[in-house]
Image (cartoon, rainbow, N blue to C red):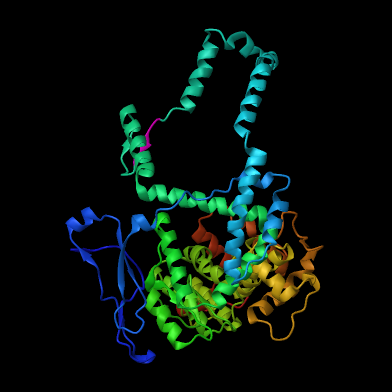
Amino acid sequence: MTDIPATGAFYTWNNKQDPQSRIYSRLDRFLVNQKWQTTFPDMMAYFHLAGLFDHSLCTVSDAKLVMTRRASFKYFNMWGKAPDFLTRVQEEWDKNYPGHKMFNVVKKLKALKPMLKDLNKECYADIEKATKFAESELAAVQPARISFLKQKAKTQWLEDGDSNTAYFHGVMRKRFNLNKVIQIENQRGVIFSDSKGIQDALLDYYESLLGSRKSTEKVRTEVLMAILVHFFNDSWDIIGEDICDAIKDFFNSGNAKSIMLLIRAFSSFSKPSGHTMNNEKSEVYYNEVSSELKNDIHQATGFVEGSLPFRYLGVPIQAGRLSQLECNALVERMVNRIRSIGEKKLSYAGRLVLINSVLNTLYSYWAGMFIIPKGVIRRIEGICRNFLWDGSSDYHRVPLVVWEKVTLPKDEGGLGIKKAELCNITAVAKLVDWVYNKADKLWIKWISQVYLKQQDWHTYTPAAGVAWSWRSIYKVKEIMKAGYQNDQWSASSKGYSIREGYEWLRTKQPKKDWVQLVWNSWNYPKHALISWIVMNQGLNVKAKLFQFGCSPDNR
């Protein structure tokens, strides 16, 4: 026995207790045997919301009959190039239909179909006939064109190209080799170099791609999505505002039925596309929602209620100021990475490479999203400093060279480690640059509507009470605004980059004469770094000599 595919409510039973002690479970199944599956291969179960009963009502229907419908209406991209396309769309879209905003949008989209069909008949009905006529005209002038091109071709090809010469065969052999498949790897990882194996591998691949129902449905869904994208791009200036208002209204007036419709839409998308929701990793966030509606949503979806702050892709997401406590995850990751490397097993040069390639990479991921608290920056720089001089995250002795010198570029006498605070500022400055250039990003459009409101970003000052994250971006803008002229980054013609921003912001130091003696191709990295410490007077030679019982003079 096996259960047939099911949709609808995720949980099919609850104990009907109060919200705090209510228990949900997926107890009910519709089990069938092999004979049933053979006789009714397209049967599907649908579990309704529990309602007054503790168990959900289950109805079974033939999915093949339910899904039978006429061929989908297709939007052809050529329609958008018609001279009066936008005028016709505007005329249909100006009509109003009574009902909710989403219902209004759906009715308008349906009303566009007959108009677009008429447009197709008027402008593109004889497109095949016109194409054949154009082909016949081309065929009439093509011989003259070929004759003209032959006279302009290279002399060697005119003389030897059409003859049975070595030059002709050499050119043909080159073209043949460019188009020849020498070897191929099939879906199981087996490599074939013989013609029979190559042919079978190609046939197996395209049979698996085009022959299966799932793959065909996936391709069909991608095509339909592309069609919708083209239509929205062609007419967004007319329909965009109504579409956005309808979506807002749908979520603002959400109820259990609308959530079920949303889940059904996700399910319809996941079947052909192969992308499915992970209920264990999915959470839902509420704002002024009743306990009864929360219970209905939980039963329908299986999603648990989330709370702020939460983590997304490893970083904390919250509405307020980022605290040092929420950054502990970053600090712990850096400490754990050092411990996984192993303490005191690397030279100074090896630790320097890991700081630049591993530890700073972990920090840079966070630094590009929000301003890191200064206390956390000091801890991060302390971890890097301790690891450089001792190979661990804890170090209680005086460093051999002060950190200010370590963070200078090599040609200025440093090791090239970048300052964490400047990295944070210049990384967030990338967001500032997007606002300057009005980048085509959703959050830029949202900021323009909510905060900027047609104000000049260069002279903008936020009002009291704005979000902490937006005020942080504004503070970075004030630091970097001197580098902008006419809303463009003046330090480079290619636009702003984090590397150039760091160089522009940091304080320059004179270049050292001894740099080439230390950092060169014939000096081992380990010896080069020891030489660098010597040049910065970081070796405690006298202290070591005293430990050995020697008393050097003080000259």
Q: Is residue 480 visible?
A: yes
Residue closer to the observer: 511 or 51? 51
Quarter of the figure with residue 63: bottom left
Is 327 left, or right, of 478 in this rendering? left
Is 246 left, or right, of 217 in this rendering? right
The spot of residue 368 in percent (x, y) is 59, 69
The spot of residue 9 in percent (x, y) is 36, 73
* Residue 311, above or below 345: below
Q: Quadrant of the N terminus?
A: bottom left
Residue closer to the observer: 136 or 393? 136
The spot of residue 116 in percent (x, y) is 63, 49
Is 383 left, or right, of 245 in this rendering? left
Which residue sits at x=33%, y=76%? 11
Q: Is residue 391 visible?
A: no
Which residue sits at x=64%, y=38%? 124
Quarter of the figure with residue 256: bottom left
Q: Name the dominant secondary structure of the magenta segment.
A: loop
Q: Quadrant of the C terminus?
A: bottom right
The spot of residue 410 in percent (x, y) is 63, 62
Specify start and end residues of the magenta stretch as a single range.
Answer: 182-186
Which residue sits at x=78%, y=60%? 490
Task: Tell me, yes or no, whether the highlighted magenta stretch contains residue 509.
Answer: no
* Residue 340, above or below 285: above
